[in-house]
Image (cartoon, rainbow, N blue to C red):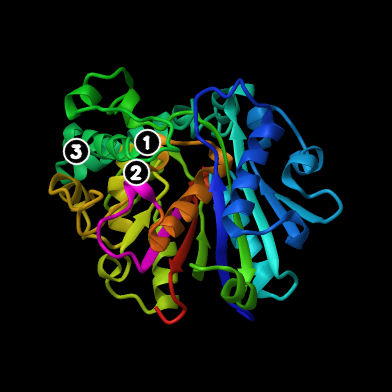
Amino acid sequence: MKRNVAIVGGGQTYHRARRHDVDQAEMVNEAVRAALKDAGMTMDEMDMVVLGNMEFFEGTHMTDCWLVHATGAYGRQGLKITTGGTVGATVVCAGAHLVASGLCDRVLCIGFEKQEEGDTGAILSGVANPLWGRSMAGAAVGYFAMMGSSYMAAWGAKEEHSAMVAVKARQNARKNKYAHLKLDITVEDVLNSRMLAWPIRMLDMCPASNGACAVILADDKTAKDRCRKPVWIRAMETAHNEQFELDWRDVKTKRPIFSKVCAGRIYGRLGVSDPKTYFDVFEIYEPATWAELVWYEDLGLCGPGEGFRLIEEGKTNIDGPIPVNPSGGVLSTNCIGASAMLRVWEAALQIRGDAGGHQVPKEVRRALTTAYGGTNWTVMIALSGALDD
Protein backbone atom coordinates (compact mmCIF):
# COMPACT_ATOMS: atom_id res chain seq x y z
CA MET A 1 0.00 0.00 0.00
CA LYS A 2 1.16 3.54 -0.71
CA ARG A 3 0.53 4.67 2.88
CA ASN A 4 -0.02 2.89 6.18
CA VAL A 5 -3.55 3.02 7.59
CA ALA A 6 -4.59 3.04 11.25
CA ILE A 7 -7.81 2.81 13.20
CA VAL A 8 -7.70 5.99 15.27
CA GLY A 9 -11.15 5.84 16.83
CA GLY A 10 -14.38 3.94 16.97
CA GLY A 11 -17.66 3.43 18.74
CA GLN A 12 -20.76 1.32 18.85
CA THR A 13 -24.30 1.43 20.15
CA TYR A 14 -25.79 -0.79 22.80
CA HIS A 15 -27.24 -3.66 20.77
CA ARG A 16 -30.78 -4.83 21.40
CA ALA A 17 -33.63 -6.81 19.89
CA ARG A 18 -35.74 -3.65 20.01
CA ARG A 19 -34.76 0.01 19.80
CA HIS A 20 -38.14 1.75 19.84
CA ASP A 21 -36.49 4.80 21.41
CA VAL A 22 -34.68 5.76 18.17
CA ASP A 23 -35.22 5.71 14.42
CA GLN A 24 -32.52 4.51 12.03
CA ALA A 25 -30.88 7.93 11.76
CA GLU A 26 -30.73 8.46 15.52
CA MET A 27 -29.31 4.98 16.08
CA VAL A 28 -26.57 5.49 13.47
CA ASN A 29 -25.76 8.90 14.93
CA GLU A 30 -25.08 7.31 18.32
CA ALA A 31 -22.22 5.29 16.83
CA VAL A 32 -20.88 8.24 14.82
CA ARG A 33 -20.76 10.50 17.87
CA ALA A 34 -19.09 7.76 19.91
CA ALA A 35 -16.40 7.27 17.24
CA LEU A 36 -15.68 11.00 16.93
CA LYS A 37 -15.45 11.35 20.69
CA ASP A 38 -13.11 8.37 20.94
CA ALA A 39 -10.84 9.81 18.23
CA GLY A 40 -11.00 13.36 19.60
CA MET A 41 -12.07 14.62 16.17
CA THR A 42 -14.97 16.43 14.51
CA MET A 43 -16.89 15.78 11.32
CA ASP A 44 -15.12 18.74 9.72
CA GLU A 45 -11.92 16.67 9.80
CA MET A 46 -13.44 13.74 7.89
CA ASP A 47 -12.64 13.64 4.17
CA MET A 48 -15.17 10.96 3.31
CA VAL A 49 -17.95 8.82 4.77
CA VAL A 50 -18.36 5.16 3.75
CA LEU A 51 -21.67 3.62 4.84
CA GLY A 52 -22.82 0.01 4.70
CA ASN A 53 -25.94 -1.96 5.58
CA MET A 54 -28.30 -4.55 4.11
CA GLU A 55 -30.95 -2.09 3.01
CA PHE A 56 -33.42 -4.74 1.81
CA PHE A 57 -33.70 -6.10 5.33
CA GLU A 58 -35.43 -2.89 6.42
CA GLY A 59 -37.11 -2.40 3.07
CA THR A 60 -35.29 0.85 2.39
CA HIS A 61 -33.08 2.13 -0.41
CA MET A 62 -30.24 4.66 -0.81
CA THR A 63 -29.58 4.88 2.92
CA ASP A 64 -26.40 6.84 2.24
CA CYS A 65 -28.56 9.65 0.85
CA TRP A 66 -31.36 9.92 3.35
CA LEU A 67 -29.13 9.42 6.40
CA VAL A 68 -26.72 12.28 5.58
CA HIS A 69 -27.90 14.30 8.57
CA ALA A 70 -27.06 11.38 10.88
CA THR A 71 -23.80 10.20 9.32
CA GLY A 72 -22.31 13.66 8.85
CA ALA A 73 -21.95 13.03 5.10
CA TYR A 74 -23.81 16.18 4.05
CA GLY A 75 -21.57 18.31 1.83
CA ARG A 76 -18.72 15.80 1.65
CA GLN A 77 -17.81 12.77 -0.41
CA GLY A 78 -19.62 9.53 0.38
CA LEU A 79 -19.92 5.92 -0.69
CA LYS A 80 -22.51 3.20 -0.03
CA ILE A 81 -21.54 -0.49 0.08
CA THR A 82 -23.58 -3.66 0.43
CA THR A 83 -21.94 -7.11 0.28
CA GLY A 84 -24.17 -9.22 2.52
CA GLY A 85 -23.00 -10.22 5.98
CA THR A 86 -19.48 -9.07 5.12
CA VAL A 87 -20.55 -5.48 4.48
CA GLY A 88 -19.04 -4.03 7.66
CA ALA A 89 -15.62 -5.46 6.82
CA THR A 90 -15.92 -4.44 3.18
CA VAL A 91 -16.59 -0.88 4.30
CA VAL A 92 -13.39 -0.95 6.38
CA CYS A 93 -11.43 -2.35 3.42
CA ALA A 94 -12.80 0.36 1.11
CA GLY A 95 -11.95 3.05 3.66
CA ALA A 96 -8.46 1.64 4.09
CA HIS A 97 -7.85 1.73 0.33
CA LEU A 98 -9.06 5.34 0.17
CA VAL A 99 -6.52 6.33 2.82
CA ALA A 100 -3.69 4.09 1.59
CA SER A 101 -4.03 5.43 -1.95
CA GLY A 102 -3.71 9.03 -0.80
CA LEU A 103 -7.22 10.00 -1.92
CA CYS A 104 -8.19 10.72 1.71
CA ASP A 105 -6.41 11.33 4.99
CA ARG A 106 -9.34 10.48 7.26
CA VAL A 107 -12.36 8.30 6.50
CA LEU A 108 -15.39 7.63 8.68
CA CYS A 109 -16.69 4.06 8.21
CA ILE A 110 -20.21 3.16 9.38
CA GLY A 111 -22.18 -0.09 9.49
CA PHE A 112 -25.68 -0.56 10.88
CA GLU A 113 -28.87 -2.63 10.86
CA LYS A 114 -32.25 -1.99 12.47
CA GLN A 115 -33.84 -5.35 11.79
CA GLU A 116 -37.01 -4.71 13.78
CA GLU A 117 -38.14 -2.40 10.95
CA GLY A 118 -38.11 -5.13 8.30
CA ASP A 119 -38.19 -8.90 7.79
CA THR A 120 -34.71 -10.33 7.40
CA GLY A 121 -35.95 -13.91 7.33
CA ALA A 122 -38.31 -13.24 4.45
CA ILE A 123 -35.55 -11.63 2.39
CA LEU A 124 -33.07 -14.44 3.08
CA SER A 125 -35.62 -17.10 2.14
CA GLY A 126 -35.36 -15.90 -1.46
CA VAL A 127 -31.57 -16.16 -1.62
CA ALA A 128 -31.31 -19.87 -2.36
CA ASN A 129 -31.76 -21.47 -5.77
CA PRO A 130 -35.39 -22.69 -5.76
CA LEU A 131 -34.33 -26.20 -6.90
CA TRP A 132 -30.81 -26.94 -5.71
CA GLY A 133 -30.85 -24.77 -2.62
CA ARG A 134 -34.40 -25.14 -1.39
CA SER A 135 -33.39 -26.69 1.95
CA MET A 136 -31.18 -23.69 2.64
CA ALA A 137 -34.10 -21.26 2.57
CA GLY A 138 -35.26 -19.82 5.88
CA ALA A 139 -32.48 -17.58 7.18
CA ALA A 140 -29.74 -20.09 6.26
CA VAL A 141 -30.57 -22.44 9.15
CA GLY A 142 -30.64 -25.35 6.70
CA TYR A 143 -27.18 -24.51 5.42
CA PHE A 144 -25.64 -24.64 8.90
CA ALA A 145 -27.63 -27.77 9.71
CA MET A 146 -25.96 -29.51 6.75
CA MET A 147 -22.60 -28.18 7.92
CA GLY A 148 -23.16 -29.55 11.43
CA SER A 149 -24.51 -32.96 10.44
CA SER A 150 -21.71 -33.51 7.94
CA TYR A 151 -19.10 -32.45 10.51
CA MET A 152 -20.51 -34.86 13.08
CA ALA A 153 -20.58 -37.75 10.61
CA ALA A 154 -17.04 -37.09 9.40
CA TRP A 155 -15.19 -36.47 12.66
CA GLY A 156 -17.28 -37.93 15.47
CA ALA A 157 -18.18 -34.62 17.10
CA LYS A 158 -21.27 -34.52 19.31
CA GLU A 159 -24.09 -32.02 19.68
CA GLU A 160 -22.54 -31.14 23.03
CA HIS A 161 -19.55 -29.60 21.23
CA SER A 162 -21.65 -27.06 19.36
CA ALA A 163 -23.45 -26.35 22.62
CA MET A 164 -20.07 -25.52 24.21
CA VAL A 165 -19.54 -22.88 21.52
CA ALA A 166 -22.93 -21.36 22.32
CA VAL A 167 -22.14 -21.25 26.04
CA LYS A 168 -18.72 -19.67 25.45
CA ALA A 169 -20.20 -16.96 23.23
CA ARG A 170 -23.03 -15.98 25.57
CA GLN A 171 -20.88 -16.09 28.71
CA ASN A 172 -18.36 -13.79 26.99
CA ALA A 173 -21.22 -11.51 25.97
CA ARG A 174 -22.17 -11.14 29.63
CA LYS A 175 -18.81 -9.40 30.11
CA ASN A 176 -19.45 -7.04 27.17
CA LYS A 177 -21.70 -4.12 28.06
CA TYR A 178 -22.64 -3.54 24.40
CA ALA A 179 -23.62 -7.13 23.51
CA HIS A 180 -27.19 -8.21 22.78
CA LEU A 181 -27.62 -11.75 24.18
CA LYS A 182 -26.19 -11.78 27.69
CA LEU A 183 -27.33 -15.27 28.58
CA ASP A 184 -26.21 -17.24 31.61
CA ILE A 185 -26.65 -20.64 29.97
CA THR A 186 -25.26 -24.16 30.22
CA VAL A 187 -24.69 -26.93 27.69
CA GLU A 188 -27.94 -28.51 28.87
CA ASP A 189 -29.84 -25.27 28.20
CA VAL A 190 -28.58 -25.27 24.61
CA LEU A 191 -29.48 -28.93 24.04
CA ASN A 192 -32.96 -28.32 25.46
CA SER A 193 -33.66 -25.26 23.29
CA ARG A 194 -36.09 -25.54 20.37
CA MET A 195 -34.97 -27.60 17.39
CA LEU A 196 -34.82 -25.63 14.13
CA ALA A 197 -33.23 -28.10 11.70
CA TRP A 198 -31.20 -30.95 13.16
CA PRO A 199 -28.64 -30.52 14.66
CA ILE A 200 -29.27 -26.75 14.82
CA ARG A 201 -31.24 -25.56 17.83
CA MET A 202 -32.40 -22.07 18.71
CA LEU A 203 -29.36 -21.33 20.89
CA ASP A 204 -27.02 -22.55 18.14
CA MET A 205 -27.98 -19.56 16.01
CA CYS A 206 -27.32 -15.82 16.11
CA PRO A 207 -30.03 -13.31 17.07
CA ALA A 208 -31.59 -10.52 15.00
CA SER A 209 -30.10 -7.38 16.55
CA ASN A 210 -30.45 -3.65 16.14
CA GLY A 211 -27.28 -1.60 16.35
CA ALA A 212 -24.52 0.38 14.66
CA CYS A 213 -20.74 0.64 14.66
CA ALA A 214 -18.37 3.31 13.35
CA VAL A 215 -14.59 3.42 13.00
CA ILE A 216 -12.30 6.22 11.85
CA LEU A 217 -9.34 5.37 9.62
CA ALA A 218 -6.40 7.72 9.13
CA ASP A 219 -3.01 8.05 7.48
CA ASP A 220 0.37 7.73 9.24
CA LYS A 221 0.74 11.40 10.11
CA THR A 222 -2.74 11.77 11.58
CA ALA A 223 -2.40 8.53 13.51
CA LYS A 224 0.96 9.45 15.02
CA ASP A 225 0.04 13.07 15.76
CA ARG A 226 -3.53 12.64 16.98
CA CYS A 227 -3.93 9.13 18.36
CA ARG A 228 -2.50 7.82 21.60
CA LYS A 229 -3.03 4.14 20.68
CA PRO A 230 -3.43 3.67 16.91
CA VAL A 231 -4.21 0.17 15.65
CA TRP A 232 -2.65 -0.55 12.28
CA ILE A 233 -4.25 -2.46 9.42
CA ARG A 234 -1.50 -4.85 8.33
CA ALA A 235 -3.24 -6.90 5.62
CA MET A 236 -6.67 -7.47 4.05
CA GLU A 237 -7.95 -10.32 1.89
CA THR A 238 -11.20 -11.46 0.27
CA ALA A 239 -12.37 -14.77 -1.22
CA HIS A 240 -15.77 -16.22 -2.07
CA ASN A 241 -17.62 -18.93 -3.94
CA GLU A 242 -21.27 -19.81 -4.49
CA GLN A 243 -22.84 -22.21 -2.00
CA PHE A 244 -25.05 -25.14 -2.90
CA GLU A 245 -26.85 -27.83 -0.98
CA LEU A 246 -24.54 -30.58 -2.25
CA ASP A 247 -21.43 -28.78 -1.01
CA TRP A 248 -21.81 -30.41 2.41
CA ARG A 249 -22.14 -34.05 1.34
CA ASP A 250 -18.65 -34.66 2.75
CA VAL A 251 -17.07 -32.14 5.10
CA LYS A 252 -13.64 -33.66 4.41
CA THR A 253 -13.44 -33.26 0.65
CA LYS A 254 -16.42 -31.47 -0.93
CA ARG A 255 -17.27 -28.56 1.34
CA PRO A 256 -16.54 -24.92 0.41
CA ILE A 257 -13.00 -23.86 1.34
CA PHE A 258 -13.35 -20.10 0.81
CA SER A 259 -12.21 -19.28 4.35
CA LYS A 260 -9.22 -21.62 4.08
CA VAL A 261 -8.17 -20.00 0.80
CA CYS A 262 -8.60 -16.50 2.22
CA ALA A 263 -6.59 -17.39 5.34
CA GLY A 264 -3.81 -18.86 3.22
CA ARG A 265 -3.57 -15.65 1.22
CA ILE A 266 -3.44 -13.31 4.20
CA TYR A 267 -0.95 -15.54 6.03
CA GLY A 268 1.21 -15.48 2.92
CA ARG A 269 1.17 -11.67 2.91
CA LEU A 270 2.30 -11.59 6.53
CA GLY A 271 4.68 -14.54 6.47
CA VAL A 272 2.61 -16.41 9.08
CA SER A 273 3.37 -20.10 9.54
CA ASP A 274 1.56 -20.70 12.84
CA PRO A 275 -1.48 -18.41 13.20
CA LYS A 276 -2.39 -19.60 16.70
CA THR A 277 0.89 -18.24 18.05
CA TYR A 278 1.26 -15.27 15.68
CA PHE A 279 -2.15 -13.78 16.54
CA ASP A 280 -3.11 -13.12 20.15
CA VAL A 281 -6.86 -12.94 19.60
CA PHE A 282 -9.38 -13.84 16.89
CA GLU A 283 -12.72 -12.16 16.23
CA ILE A 284 -14.46 -14.42 13.72
CA TYR A 285 -17.88 -14.10 12.12
CA GLU A 286 -19.82 -17.17 13.27
CA PRO A 287 -23.58 -17.04 12.55
CA ALA A 288 -23.93 -20.58 13.95
CA THR A 289 -22.03 -22.71 16.44
CA TRP A 290 -20.93 -25.36 13.96
CA ALA A 291 -19.41 -22.69 11.71
CA GLU A 292 -17.00 -21.70 14.47
CA LEU A 293 -15.72 -25.28 14.78
CA VAL A 294 -15.24 -25.62 11.02
CA TRP A 295 -13.49 -22.25 10.77
CA TYR A 296 -11.06 -23.10 13.58
CA GLU A 297 -9.72 -25.65 11.14
CA ASP A 298 -9.83 -23.42 8.06
CA LEU A 299 -7.90 -20.74 9.95
CA GLY A 300 -5.18 -23.23 10.82
CA LEU A 301 -5.78 -23.12 14.56
CA CYS A 302 -5.81 -26.93 14.53
CA GLY A 303 -5.76 -29.81 12.09
CA PRO A 304 -8.74 -31.24 10.13
CA GLY A 305 -11.30 -32.81 12.42
CA GLU A 306 -9.77 -31.24 15.54
CA GLY A 307 -11.93 -28.13 15.84
CA PHE A 308 -14.29 -29.70 18.35
CA ARG A 309 -11.29 -30.70 20.47
CA LEU A 310 -10.30 -27.03 20.85
CA ILE A 311 -13.66 -26.10 22.35
CA GLU A 312 -13.74 -29.30 24.41
CA GLU A 313 -10.37 -28.44 25.98
CA GLY A 314 -11.25 -24.77 26.53
CA LYS A 315 -8.41 -23.52 24.35
CA THR A 316 -10.54 -20.84 22.66
CA ASN A 317 -11.96 -19.45 25.90
CA ILE A 318 -11.31 -15.82 26.78
CA ASP A 319 -8.52 -16.94 29.14
CA GLY A 320 -7.29 -19.74 26.89
CA PRO A 321 -4.19 -19.82 24.69
CA ILE A 322 -6.23 -19.05 21.54
CA PRO A 323 -9.00 -16.60 22.54
CA VAL A 324 -11.80 -16.57 19.96
CA ASN A 325 -14.60 -14.00 20.14
CA PRO A 326 -14.09 -12.60 23.64
CA SER A 327 -16.75 -10.04 22.69
CA GLY A 328 -19.42 -12.73 22.39
CA GLY A 329 -19.22 -12.71 18.60
CA VAL A 330 -22.04 -12.79 16.08
CA LEU A 331 -23.70 -15.55 18.08
CA SER A 332 -24.47 -12.91 20.69
CA THR A 333 -24.89 -9.77 18.55
CA ASN A 334 -25.90 -9.73 14.89
CA CYS A 335 -26.87 -6.32 13.56
CA ILE A 336 -25.90 -7.60 10.11
CA GLY A 337 -24.68 -4.40 8.45
CA ALA A 338 -22.44 -3.73 11.46
CA SER A 339 -21.54 -7.28 12.52
CA ALA A 340 -18.34 -7.56 10.46
CA MET A 341 -17.21 -4.07 11.46
CA LEU A 342 -17.78 -4.98 15.08
CA ARG A 343 -15.25 -7.80 14.64
CA VAL A 344 -12.67 -5.22 13.54
CA TRP A 345 -13.51 -2.70 16.25
CA GLU A 346 -13.61 -5.33 19.01
CA ALA A 347 -10.20 -6.63 17.88
CA ALA A 348 -8.85 -3.07 17.90
CA LEU A 349 -10.15 -2.60 21.45
CA GLN A 350 -8.30 -5.75 22.51
CA ILE A 351 -5.04 -4.44 21.05
CA ARG A 352 -5.56 -1.07 22.73
CA GLY A 353 -6.35 -2.78 26.03
CA ASP A 354 -9.69 -0.98 26.14
CA ALA A 355 -12.15 -3.90 25.91
CA GLY A 356 -13.19 -3.51 29.54
CA GLY A 357 -14.84 -6.54 31.12
CA HIS A 358 -14.11 -8.80 28.17
CA GLN A 359 -10.45 -7.84 27.78
CA VAL A 360 -8.27 -10.88 27.13
CA PRO A 361 -6.00 -11.33 30.19
CA LYS A 362 -2.79 -11.78 28.17
CA GLU A 363 -1.02 -9.06 26.15
CA VAL A 364 -2.65 -8.56 22.75
CA ARG A 365 -0.30 -7.31 20.03
CA ARG A 366 -1.88 -8.80 16.92
CA ALA A 367 -5.41 -9.83 15.98
CA LEU A 368 -7.21 -11.44 13.05
CA THR A 369 -10.81 -10.67 12.13
CA THR A 370 -13.06 -12.48 9.68
CA ALA A 371 -16.38 -11.71 8.03
CA TYR A 372 -18.85 -14.09 6.40
CA GLY A 373 -21.81 -13.48 4.13
CA GLY A 374 -24.12 -15.03 1.59
CA THR A 375 -22.56 -16.87 -1.38
CA ASN A 376 -19.74 -17.83 0.97
CA TRP A 377 -18.05 -14.44 0.76
CA THR A 378 -15.33 -13.97 3.35
CA VAL A 379 -13.17 -10.98 4.28
CA MET A 380 -10.18 -11.09 6.61
CA ILE A 381 -8.33 -8.17 8.18
CA ALA A 382 -5.13 -8.44 10.24
CA LEU A 383 -4.41 -5.77 12.86
CA SER A 384 -1.45 -4.91 15.06
CA GLY A 385 -0.54 -2.34 17.67
CA ALA A 386 2.77 -1.46 16.01
CA LEU A 387 3.92 -1.24 12.41
CA ASP A 388 6.93 -3.43 13.09
CA ASP A 389 4.86 -6.10 14.85
Q: Quadrant of the C terminus?
A: bottom left
Nearer the N terminus, badge 3 or badge 2? Answer: 3
Give the number of the disc on residue 5: none
* Quadrant housing residue 76: bottom right
Quick check: is 338 in the magenta stretch?
A: no
Residue depicted at 46% across the width and 51% down the height = 343
Residue type at the position of mark 2: Ala
Residue depicted at 22% across the width and 57% down the height = 304
Q: What is the secondary structure assignment of the residue under circle 3?
A: helix
| Cα gap from disc 3 to disc 1, whole angstroms | 15 Å
Identify the residue under disc 1: 144
Along the line of sight, the residue nearer the viewer: 162 or 304? 162
Q: Position of residue 36 (x, y in %)?
A: 64, 53
Q: How many marks?
A: 3
| Front position among marks 3 and 1 | 3
Q: Magenta residues, as a range? A: 355-370
| Front position among marks 2 and 1 | 2
Q: Position of residue 358 (x, y in %)?
A: 33, 47
